[in-house]
Image: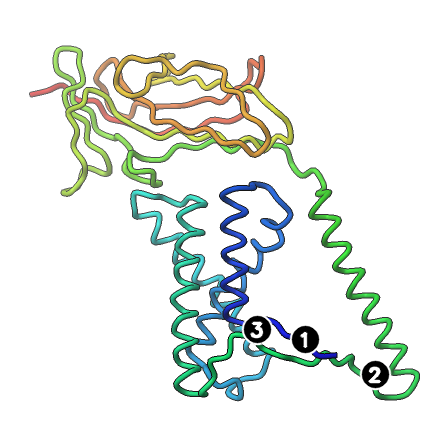
Amino acid sequence: MKFKILNDILLIDVLSIILILSIIFIPSTVVRVILGLPFVLFFPGYTLVAALFVKHGRMNNIERLSLSIGLSLAIAAMIGFGLNYTTWGIKLNPIIYIIVVFIFIMSAIVLVRRARTLKISKLITEFELRLPGWGGNSLNKSLSVILIIVAFGTLGTLAYTTIEPKVGEKFAEFYILGINGNAEDYPNEFVMNNGQISQVIYGDGTTGNLVSTSGYGTINLWIINQEQQTVFYTVKMTIDGAPTTIYYGGTNTRVNWPIELNQGEKWETSIDVIPQHTGDEQKVELLLFKGDGTLAEDSVYFWINVQQAQ
């Protein structure tokens, strides 16, 4: 049986575009789940391998598949590592967009090299589907039928588990990031003058760290609901053991608690850190409470030093 489809590279490009559109316009769809795995675990590596090894005879399909998966994991890891040092941070959208750009660049290189090296510029590929063993005896034909049933059974199981996923562990993601949205550059050093914060140093105090005279330190607070249901969250802050009101924007505007989040929904904001007295090794702790609970579900903290102005 013969089929005509887009060639492998263009097919990957089209599937990547479909995934991006589903993420932007239709969150939490089956398409997003089904295309997400090969998008991260296969597409980047496959296009890179295709760009490096234009002639298929240089490696067999198993070697090409294994190398594609390994390179895809490495590419995704390097992209995440690099984003951690940018203002974007390690977030879903920047990672997805950069992977798409990488795939498109590699795809263009592959198409150009195939046209020049192999003299191939077809957009449509024709292939013939042959069932293994179908041309043999009755035993081989029976095994082929069993293989088809197993394949369709596997696809059906995958589709069912995707549409009706098993409810996993219930938890809330609760963490803080530095002023630039990375896991660093927290406000660590404060200078107090006449009871007011006059200077804030972000980072470890070395040359090149950000110095601010805003009168408060800034951190980014994130909550992501993975409780499988709608939950109301409240966050409380203590500095050196003393409760303090959580403000944001440097305008003495209080964060209105509780925050209502649906399953999978995230909430983020920049909050102010304003110590009230001098002293080293003051613990800034944020505690997460769920519903009307009196015991904290989770907590995060970091340390600050507050010095008197000279």
Toward the left, the furthest residue is 310
Q: Nearer the viewer, residue 60 or 148?
A: 148
Is the residue marked by circle 2 packed among few (<14), some (14-19), or many (20+) residues within 10 Å?
A: some
Q: Is residue 276 above or below residue 14?
A: above
Q: Nearer the viewer, residue 167 or 137?
A: 137
The amino acid type found where label 3 is placed reads Leu
In 3D space, how far apart are the residues under numbered discs 3 and 1 (Cα atoms)? 22 Å
Residue at mark 3? 65
* Element under disc 3: helix
Q: Which mark is residue 221?
A: none
In 3D space, how far apart are the residues under numbered discs 2 and 1 (Cα atoms)? 18 Å
Q: Which of the two discs, 3 and 1, labels the residue nearer the N terminus?
A: 1
Residue at mark 1? 3
Q: Residue at x 61, y 24 (%)?
A: 230
* Element under disc 2: loop
Instruction: Residue 240: give x, y in percent of width and height.
Output: 33, 18
**Comparing labels 2 and 1, the label whose residue is closer to the camera:** 1
Quadrant of the rendering where the N terminus is positioned: bottom right
Q: Residue at x 49, y 63 (%)?
A: 13
Residue at mark 2? 134
